[in-house]
Image: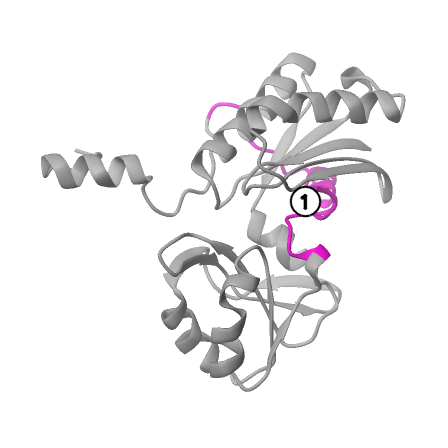
Amino acid sequence: MKLLAIDSATQAATCTVMDDDKLLGEITFNYKKQHSVILMTMIDNMLNTVNLKVEDLDGFVVSKGPGSFTGLRIGMSIIKGLSEGSKKPFVSVSSLDALAHNMAYSSGIICPVLDALRDNVYTALYTFENDTLKRLTDYDAMHITELLELLKTYNSKVTFIGDATFKFKDFFQENLEDAHFAPAHLNLVRSSSLCDIGMKLLKSGVEDDLITSKPIYIRKSQAEREYEKRTGMSIDE
């Protein structure tokens, strides 16, 4: 099964092509470029380099977040368009799952952290047991002090991974007895990890619906929060 996977949940943009368990190629840019400008070019360059066309692919994988609202919408729109145009299935995978997958075979708690601003992080807790990644908590956005108190209840080694790791490394080191941190190159959401998870899902018959599939936002966007503050009305009303 040949799959194309993309992630645009954070500042980094990345795409991968895999053929079953063989990684054919992966491109990652972690620089201040607009995803809407570079992602399609990245995909086109990747497919050309590995001598594939969209019609040669068997499906697609996309990050559903949490992360940047705009980035997630761009990624989802691209993959939905490719899926609809090629009549091939797609599946969405959490960016937190993909980050945790970067630390496969680690002991203790795996704690991906994506910067959600104002000392908040997007996170979930995982363990790797019996060759399987197991999620222990729901996807959530919380203040780092709240996350710290949650982690202390597990009384376990904790490995942090994600783009908020450097920002809060000192805080976690000072307040957790057994805190560890992923190598710098693993702190990005890797489209290869995303693709590996998506490969297993698609092979097992799991796929997203073109109409109902949507990103994991967890909380309302800044624009929605500012509107509600200004008008006193809920955006959902």
- Element on which disc 1 rests: helix
- Which residue is the site of mark 1? 194
Q: Residue at x 28, y 35 (%)?
A: 223
| Residue type of the residue flagged with mark 1 | Leu
Relative to 182, residue 189 above or below? above
Q: Quadrant of the C terminus?
A: top left
The image shows residue 31 at horizontal and vertical percentages of 62, 39
Q: Is residue 57 left or right of residue 36?
A: right
Specify start and end residues of the magenta stretch as a single range: 185-211
Tally of marks: 1
Q: Is residue 141 left or right of residue 170?
A: left
Q: Residue at x 44, y 58 (%)?
A: 121
Q: Residue furthest top?
A: 85
Of residues 108 and 114, the one nearer the viewer is: 114
Query: Is residue 174 visible from the viewing direction of this image?
Result: yes
Q: Quadrant of the N terminus?
A: top right
The image shows residue 40 at horizontal and vertical percentages of 66, 21
Q: Is residue 193 left or right of residue 94?
A: right
Q: Residue at x 87, y 25 (%)?
A: 49
The image shows residue 110 at horizontal and vertical percentages of 60, 68
Would you call the spot at circle 1 few (<14 residues within 10 Å), some (14-19), or many (20 or more)? Answer: many
